[in-house]
Image (cartoon, rainbow, N blue to C red):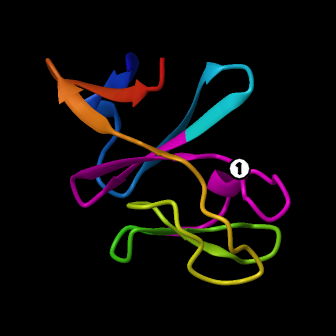
Amino acid sequence: MADFRVCALAELAPGTMKVIRPAPDLPIGVFNAGGELFAIEDRCSHDDGPLCEGDWDPDDCTVVCPRHGSNFSLRTGKAVTLPAYIPVDTYPVKVVDGDVVVELPA
């Protein structure tokens, strides 16, 4: 796994999110849901749309695709509602020396 620094933890307050691009073809949304950090692929599995541009619920830990309304779990990447049914990738997130870091596949 390769570590990718997102930002200082202080810059990602609870209830906020940030989209990162560790590679040109790998957009990832990083979410702070009440102090719990999640990273999920920024691509709806239904139509490849920008998943993280949709609304999200920090209490339910879900994000809603803005195109067709599919809900995805931030914890697992599982499509919770139709029309999407294929999960999206999630990535481990940790805090290292005060920085939010996403672990990426090598």
70 or 58: nearer the viewer: 70
- Counting every numbered tag in the picture gives 1
> Percent position (x, y) of residue 101?
32, 26
As for residue 10 lying within the magenta part, the answer is no
Q: Answer with left or right where residue 74 lies relative to residue 13.
A: right
Which quadrant would residue 5 be assigned to in this image? top left
> Percent position (x, y) of residue 97?
14, 17
Q: Answer with left or right where residue 61 lies relative to residue 10.
A: right
77 or 31: nearer the viewer: 77
33 or 38: nearer the viewer: 38
Residue at image location 38% in from the left, 20% down from the top? 1
Residue at image location 75% in from the left, 67% down from the top? 66
- Considering the numbered disc 1 on the image, is that residue within a helix, a strand or a loop? loop
Q: Answer with left or right where residue 48 lies relative to residue 42.
A: right
Write down the residue under mark 1.
43
91 or 8: nearer the viewer: 91
Residue at image location 73% in from the left, 77% down from the top? 69
Residue at image location 73% in from the left, 73% down from the top? 84
- The residue carrying pointer 1 sits among few (fewer than 14), some (14 to 19) or many (20 or more) residues within 10 Å by Cα, namely many
> Percent position (x, y) of residue 14?
29, 53
As for residue 32 lying within the magenta part, the answer is yes
Q: Is 95 drawn above or below residue 74 in the view shown?
A: above
What is the magenta range? 29-56
Q: Answer with left or right where residue 103 lies relative to residue 84.
A: left
> Percent position (x, y) of residue 90?
47, 47
Q: Is 24 drawn above or below residue 14 in the view shown?
A: above
Q: Is 56 drawn above or below residue 23 in the view shown?
A: below
User: What is the three-letter code of the residue carrying label 1?
Assistant: Arg
